[in-house]
Amino acid sequence: SEVKKIAVIAGDGIGPEVVAEAEKVLKVTEEVFGYKFETEHALFGGIAIDEKGTPLPTETLDICKSADAVLLGAVGGPKWDTNPKELRPETGLLGIRKALGLFSNLRPAVVFDCLKDASTLKPEVLEGTDLIVVRELTGGIYFGEKFRRQSEQGEEAVDTCAYNVTEVERIARQAFEIAAKRRGKLASVDKANVLETSRLWREVVIRVSADYPNVELEHVLVDNCAMQLLRRPSSFDVIVTENMFGDILSDEAAMLTGSIGMLASASLGEGSYGLYEPVHGSAPDIAGQGLANPIATILSLALMFRMTFGYEDAAAAIEAAVAQVLDAGHRTSDIAVDKSKAISTSEMGDLIVAAI
Amino acid sequence: SEVKKIAVIAGDGIGPEVVAEAEKVLKVTEEVFGYKFETEHALFGGIAIDEKGTPLPTETLDICKSADAVLLGAVGGPKWDTNPKELRPETGLLGIRKALGLFSNLRPAVVFDCLKDASTLKPEVLEGTDLIVVRELTGGIYFGEKFRRQSEQGEEAVDTCAYNVTEVERIARQAFEIAAKRRGKLASVDKANVLETSRLWREVVIRVSADYPNVELEHVLVDNCAMQLLRRPSSFDVIVTENMFGDILSDEAAMLTGSIGMLASASLGEGSYGLYEPVHGSAPDIAGQGLANPIATILSLALMFRMTFGYEDAAAAIEAAVAQVLDAGHRTSDIAVDKSKAISTSEMGDLIVAAI
Ligand SMILES: CC(C)[C@H](C(=O)O)[C@@H](O)C(=O)O
Ligand SMILES: CC(C)[C@H](C(=O)O)[C@@H](O)C(=O)O
């Protein structure tokens, strides 16, 4: 079959370790399923600041653009936190989203059986929670004009939040498509009682909903959504919202599952192009010690197979392998009840490879 | 002693019922402690739309301005939800905040022993949770310029978020004062890695912190805060944040206590002026049936005594009376385990009055 090109960005902290395990998985799926992949590594984030003087080198962008999909480990760390804006890993993150047109961020929040007790929510409340947050990723207050000016009350800072019909429509349509393939329920989250962008958002979502008569649509105000996620998490199927609200709500949703260390995410652009990464961060405190859990990154690869390449068989095989290894009781230290029995990052990767 | 003037806004839904019980409490504290109050009722919200054609009649504003403090029940309901913007209760709410200069919204989130089990969080996680969210209330994206314009990608909506040094400084200072009187911990929440307003926010908070060497300050990104509230709610003491983030986080914090139906709030202006209201809404579904729980409104009155009038004795007496009535097992239906034994709104009010 056709060779698929994957740009691989290991990044900072535990990024290189978890990505290395995902690459082992990539290799074995080639052997087992006959797919062909070509990988190209690129520098990004803190390490790119150190080695190239910018978080997002042109070369990295070129590698990503010429690839069919991107696998990202994690970026950032205290080392770069006090840098000026242009020299911060986050600036690279916002830059790559915009440059690659990744307008949609999907964050499935599911509960792993073996981690049920890790949640701070009561098990009976969590029961059946399986939702996905569809976050608009290249618009809103993140990318609007920002500046300082003098006012009568001292210096003033300004951020601008803007959304146009096209931007809202494409993310709404994608959310409806996803909901239609799941349990058919979509919650559109906004603050239409206060914000003009939210009123436009709601108008467009309502218009698009006419094309999806089988998806049940509800509008939820963002403050109420922050509450309902706690009160009835399992009642949500797909949540669609704008960039800033999505940042907050997707983290809240991920945390309440108790499984945040195991969650994958996808940032999608036009067509089937996508960037895949674990929800967890770069965890600089445990970097380089073989303690990191590679599962979220491996599941991000599975998501890439499913969403960008349409390799459902390989995606399902990876997910089944992960489940099998967990069922057999293997745990990295972050999820081990008995830390003394914890296995290393590479042992976990090897077990998953063997199970595929 | 001096006569204190209180503007009383019953509002919509269960508002009139719960406010009536708070007025009984007001009366008995006059008798017991010798304080003198003068109340004046004013129309606001949905009922003002119906009777006066505007959610915030000039007369109401005048009554509030000439008073020392305002007691508010609740506003809003489905009846007005589809009205044009000028004829919606929320518009009145934003208008009254701005007109009265209520720049600070305090929302204590505490756990009531009798409601511990009502939380969806595990009791051991909730244990010891007692935090207060200090939300900036008259700035940010709520009050910035809003408009529509044509763009190349169809109609576009714009909201502007602005903060100046003076606005940030006064709310920061207030939050530090509150933290200094509590456990001495302040979490300032922003999104300084993305927003210019957040960078200004952080600069000002750091500057103000120099005057409060005994308050321990931490900066928390808003997405991380949404997670940490779930992971370690009891570790927070005071959280200070801007208007939009405060809207979301204060609701999340209130909900996780499980006690949302019992929480009071204060919106403060310059000097000792303040508007006090329960955190819960107008609950139109149970309005007029004597089912509402008046405790949050009664505790809002206690907060008024403490914060606006400095009547600590009366405030403490009300709080003790509420605790005593709850300890004796009396419950309105919202918090009753055995609904058949639930008492009515006015029975609850009478019991609290008797206990004072
Ligand atoms: C690092 C930061 C800029 C980023 C965001 O706010 O989008 C992160 O929080 C995320 O959610 O991916
Ligand atoms: C009704 C709405 C405008 C209001 C707000 O967003 O401020 C409410 O959610 C609140 O928190 O008081």
Image: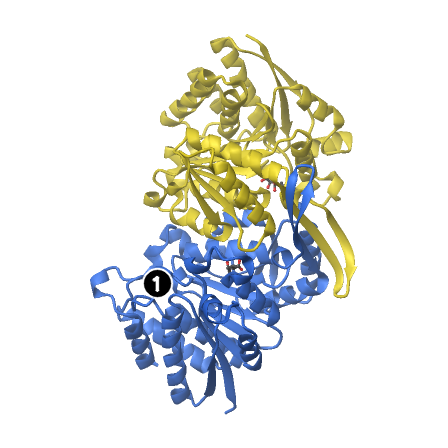
Chain colours: A blue, B yellow
Q: Is residue A143 left or right of residue B233?
A: right
Q: Classify mark 1 as within 8 Å of ligand 1 or not, answering yes or no.
A: no
Coordinates of residue A203 in the picture (x, y in percent) = 71, 56
Coordinates of residue B209 in the picture (x, y in percent) = 47, 37
Element marked by disc 1: helix
Q: Disc 1 is attached to a residue of which chain?
A: A
Q: Which residue is drawn at 46% across and 60% down?
A: A80
Coordinates of residue B334 in the picture (x, y in percent) = 47, 36
Quadrant hosting ligand 2: top right
Residues packed near mark 1 inside 10 Å, few (<14), some (14 to 19) or many (20 plus): few
Q: In this view, does A356 lie to the left or right of A307?
A: left
Q: Is residue A100 left or right of residue B295?
A: right
| Image-quadrant location for residue B259 | top left
The correct choice, above or below, for B291 with respect to A262 in the image is above
The correct choice, above or below, for A92 with respect to A156 in the image is below
Residue type (three-letter) at the residue carrying disc 1: Asp
Q: Between residues A180 and B173, which one lies in front from this camera angle?
A: B173
- In this view of the protein, can residue A133 be seen by the observer? no
Q: Residue at x 64, y 26 (%)?
A: B9
Coordinates of residue A201 in the picture (x, y in percent) = 67, 57
- In this view of the protein, can residue A249 be seen by the observer? yes
The residue identified by callout 1 is: A113
